[in-house]
Amino acid sequence: MRLESRRPLPSFLSGFRGASALVALALGFSACVVPASRYDDARSALRLERDANRHAMERVYAMEREVRALGEALDQRQRALEGRDEQLAQSELDMTLASRKEKDATQRVDQLRGELARVGEHLRFFASQKEELERALDAAEARIAHLYQAEREAARSALVVRDLSLLLHDELATGELTLELAEGEPVLRAPRARLFGEDGALAPGAQPLVAALARAGRLHPGARVTLAERGSAPSATPEQSALRLGRLSAALASAGLSASQVTIAAPGARDEAGAPEPAQGSEPSVEIVFAADSAEPTDVAGLVAAPDAATAPGAS
């Protein structure tokens, strides 16, 4: 609390002033009747009183200054306390805001963790679906490739069947020769007597058939021609069968068919491969299997226009 610069004097000081005035007045009235020695004593007492009064006033002023200084110090301390209170309040507010922000951040982190967990589950689900779709796609591609390969093989086999039908039309029409598909491969069957004599040599009348087979092989350069015997007589040996088929292979090579295209099947190989058994009591036959590996176009018009030239002896 602030003090005024000038304050009323204490009561004891007011008394001192009144006493001094009375002493002076008494001395004035009694000057004419009081001896000089007493007058000097009175003046000395008055001087002493004045000095004491002055010292008291100085002490009062000093005390006022001290009180004023103490009041200012108290005011400063009060302001400092108020500032500290404001700082404490601001600190508490900052701590409250920081705690709230931390709580909000914790909630956001928990929310983000939950969202990340859901995203992870979705990603795992999508990954499993992707794997299933990839497996289904691979299976579909494999089926498509298999179907495409089967379609190509069917188209190649159809071309070989077509060319053989055009080249051997008359023999197939009379039933002397048979042409069918076995496991997707064209198989031409001819009686063994149609191709070989009793001694195993190539029969003279087999040359047109050999020429037609060689022509069909040349029309399909990538085809593999496999020769095999079925239904051989009990007395026949595998060596004899191999000898006859070797002669037929040589005749095909002489007619213009590449030797790399001709293969002689081992005795019984066609049986192990699952080829249909010949009918009981049927005569021995020779099977010529065309495994078509290419689908090169052929001149169908030329085959139809000159079937006799294709089957004539020595035709190329």
Image: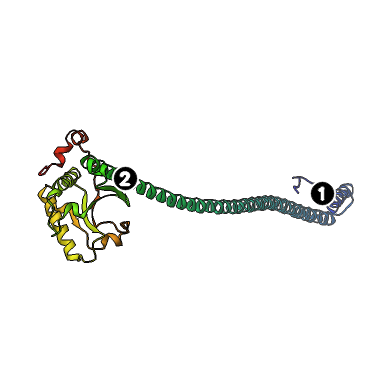
Packing grade of label 1 (10 A; few <14, some 14-19, many >=20) is few
Q: How does the figure colour the protein chain or chains?
A: rainbow
Residue 188 x, y percent position in the rendering: 25, 49
Residue 103 x, y percent position in the rendering: 63, 53
Q: Nearer the observer, disc 2 or disc 1? A: 2
Q: Are marks 2 and 1 in contact (CB under 8 Å)?
A: no
For badge 1, the amino acid type reads Leu
Label of residue 189 in the image:
none
Q: Nearer the viewer, residue 138 or 56?
A: 138
Residue 64 x, y percent position in the rendering: 74, 51
Identify the residue at horizontal 84%, vertical 52% (top origin).
Answer: 16
Kindly identify which residue carries mark 2.
154
Task: Indicate whether 167 appears above or below 113.
Answer: above
On-image quarter of the C terminus: top left
Q: Find residue 296 and report its image quarter.
A: top left
**What secondary structure is found at the residue carrying circle 2?**
helix
Q: CA distance from mark 2 to mark 1?
A: 138 Å
Identify the residue at horizontal 21%, vertical 52% (top origin).
Answer: 225
Q: Nearer the viewer, residue 58 or 203?
A: 203
Packing grade of label 2 (10 A; few <14, some 14-19, many >=20) is some
Q: Nearer the viewer, residue 199 or 248?
A: 199
Identify the residue at horizontal 15%, vertical 45% (top origin).
Answer: 208
Task: Indicate whether 67 appears above or below 159.
Answer: below
Residue 125 placement, left or right of 143: right
For marks 2 and 1 on the same chain, the one whose residue lies earlier in the sequence: 1
Q: Nearer the viewer, residue 113 or 298?
A: 298
Residue 292 x, y percent position in the rendering: 25, 48
Residue 12 placement, left or right of 229: right
For badge 2, the amino acid type reads Ala
**What secondary structure is found at the residue carrying circle 1?**
loop
Kindly identify which residue carries mark 1.
9
Residue 140 placement, left or right of 232: right
